[in-house]
Amino acid sequence: MMNSVARWKLSSRVTVPRTTEPGPASLCATVSQSALPAGLRCGDPSATLTSDRRMDHYTHPSVDIQGSESRTLSGVRIALGVTGSVAVTRTVEIARGLMRHGADVFPVMSRAATELIQPALLEWATGQRPVTELTGAIEHVALAGSREDRADLILIAPATANTIGKTAAGIDDTPVTTLLTTALGSGIPVLMVPAMHEPMYRHPLVTRNMETLREIGIGFVMPDVSEGKAKIADTRQILAAVVAALDRSHSALTGRRLLITAGRTVEYLDPVRVITNNSTGRMGRALAEQALAAGAEVTVVWGKASVEPPAGTRAIRVDTADQMRETVEQELRRTHYDILLAAAAVSDWKPAESSDKKIATHGSDRLTVELVPTAKIIDNVKEIAPQLYLVAFRAVYGLSKAELEEDARARCARAKADLIAVNDVSAPGAGFETTTNAMTVFTAAGRRFEIELGSKEEVAAQLFHMVGQELGTPG
């Protein structure tokens, strides 16, 4: 791919009419000093440009980082819309993260964003002069119109409640919202990364606006809700969502209906004490986010978790393994689902009897509890929905590669699963209570894949890549 500056320099082209060969004075009247190539000064006798001489030969030093980490996004052109959230302070990191994986990044800023950071900072970061107003160069069409060299993806990071609402209502009164209007009319994929205070994020109309945008194909990279704020997503999570949105295999998920189990179940000894595990629900959340970004309709059966289900999913909350099994079976009987991802960490054992009152400890030095196995949720789903594409998940501990494969294939066969993803929770970074994971994936057809250690968002994206390849495009 040609260098991004050589292919497209929206704001830095220097052009003088063919009919004149301007000297220093006329040149200074034609272009500003900031638009001249390095070393060229108004008043310099050499300051003579014709219509055939432009800055296309000049490569901004900041693009030197392009592809320094990977070529995953090589050849990809991303228009980065920046709006007026304080999370704009993260935009440089996001832009340069995209570039390090090979992307060309073209910033577009709302006026509110320019009041928080200077456009010069994003020009330094990307090597591209930001679009801060729409001019006779019709920048929104150059970036997102029906052109061969248009952007491949529009990424709005951060996306304010204001921009989300305007886009849902079809209002375009800033460079960013006009870019979005043009992109949606041109069929360019759009990802939004919300960032705002939590009360704004919880506003029912903001939620409705996000759902409206999902219905027309816009993906979201959901925020981390903590400390009273919906904080902009981690850069690695944003990168994974970008890759997912651009991955053609994800078209296999567009329009599909997915059911995902997530989190952990609890089994009550008494009203206040439970048997459970350390699952946080982050893997299930990452799967739901990736599926939403790919255009799927997602229902989550949500157990106990340290995180909330993503906005835009239909969430059914449960506590126990029996409740989760009953809910999954009811959903499969009443609704057609294309894919079930059984990612929840379901308790294997439950008390044979539980007390309806808190068990007293005074006067007792021992409590004996009889445990019985819980029913396996995935063992019956193919009887209910034979057409379902079933992705099973399994956590093992300390098995050799041969033992892990034997265990996984036996479990896959027993559940009649189409694919099983296994993680060894004894491996550093691949267990519970981490933000990373690594998996070995087996298909019922006998194939084996390794997903190396990465963020749970990255792992989810790679897993869906495999599922997409297996499924193909919906008919």
Image (tube, rainbow, N blue to C red):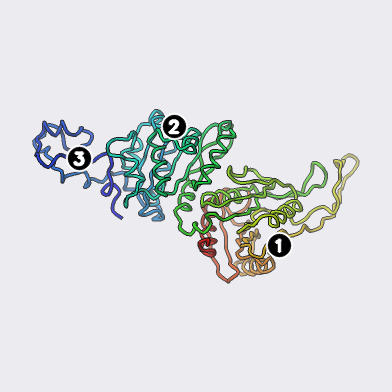
Q: In this view, does 455 lie to the left or right of 142?
A: right
Residue 14 is labelled as 3
Please tell me which residue is depicted at 82% across the width and 47% down the height of the picture.
269
Other residues around mark 3 within 10 Å, as few (<14) / some (14–19) / many (≥20): many
Q: Quadrant of residue 117?
A: top left
Classify the position of the N terminus by image quarter.
bottom left
Q: Is residue 128 left or right of residue 33?
A: right
Q: Quadrant of residue 229?
A: top right
Q: How many marks?
A: 3
Q: Distance between the residues labelled 1 and 2?
A: 49 Å
Q: Where is residue 367 in the image (x, y as percent from the top left)?
A: 86, 48
Q: Where is residue 393 in the image (x, y as percent from the top left)?
A: 63, 59
Q: Distance between the residues labelled 2 and 3?
A: 31 Å
CB within 8 Å, label 1 to label 2: no
Of the two numbered discs 1 and 2 on the same chain, state the one appearing first in sequence.
2
Q: Name the foreground residue: 2 vs 293.
A: 293
Q: Give SS at disc 3.
A: loop
Residue, disc 1: 384
Number of the front mark, 1 or 2? 1
Residue, disc 2: 84
Mark 1: which amino acid? Ile
Q: Position of residue 448 (x, y in %)?
A: 55, 67
Q: Name the foreground residue: 429 vs 30.
A: 30
Q: Which residue lies furthest to the right in this view?
A: 363
Q: Quadrant of residue 417?
A: bottom right
Q: Residue furthest top?
A: 115
Q: In this view, does 135 lie to the left or right of 235?
A: left
Mark 3: which amino acid? Val
Q: Where is residue 84 in the image (x, y as percent from the top left)?
A: 44, 32
Q: Give SS at disc 1.
A: helix
Q: Residue furthest bottom?
A: 446
Q: Name the foreground residue: 9 vs 274.
A: 9
